[in-house]
Amino acid sequence: MVLKESLDGFTNLSSIDFTLYIHSIYMAFYNYKKEVLLIYHSNLSSLLLDVLSKRFQFSEIAIEFPLTKQYELSYIIGGIYNNLIFWMSRDMNETPDELTEISLQFRDEESISLLSLR
């Protein structure tokens, strides 16, 4: 429930840019830092991938895309998931601002944005 609640904060952000969007994801988790770290240290963080896939409506959206775009969307969700897991492994030491800056350094401007899928 904590993971779902933490992700509810960025469901209606389709009109903002990628920087604000990714920052809102990090903030959502940071706001529940204690609970999220408890989930991580209890080896239950795999639940996060299910929550992310549902939040981004992967099953409903991806089926309409060509196969290569389905893989790209899966790759993006996996990247967000892995960044969150790595952040948790570091006890979420970086602030959402720092993590946003890091994320912007390797984002390909040509890649599809989860924002454009909404």
Image (cartoon, rainbow, N blue to C red):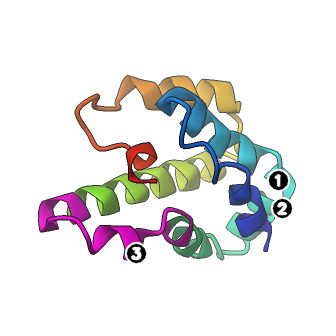
Residue, x 75% and y 57% (percent of image)?
6
Whether tag 1 and tag 3 are in contact, CB under 8 A, the answer is: no
Question: 10 above or below 40?
Answer: above
Circle 3: element type: helix
91 or 22: which is nearer to us? 22
Marker disc for residue 60: 3
The question of residue 63 being in magenta is answered with yes
Residue, x 20% and y 58% (percent of image)?
69
Say which residue label 1 marks.
Answer: 32
Q: Is residue 13 left or right of residue 67?
A: right
Q: Amino acid at mark 2?
A: Glu
Circle 2: element type: helix
Report crowding for label 3: few under 14, some 14 to 19, many 20 or more residues within 10 A (C-alpha).
few
Marker disc for residue 21: none
Residue, x 62% and y 70% (percent of image)?
45
Circle 1: element type: loop
**Dot in front, 1 or 3:** 3
Q: Which residues are magenta?
A: 53-70
Image coords of residue 28 (percent x, y): 73, 48
Q: Amino acid at mark 1?
A: Tyr
Whether tag 1 and tag 2 are in contact, CB under 8 A, the answer is: yes
Report crowding for label 2: few under 14, some 14 to 19, many 20 or more residues within 10 A (C-alpha).
some
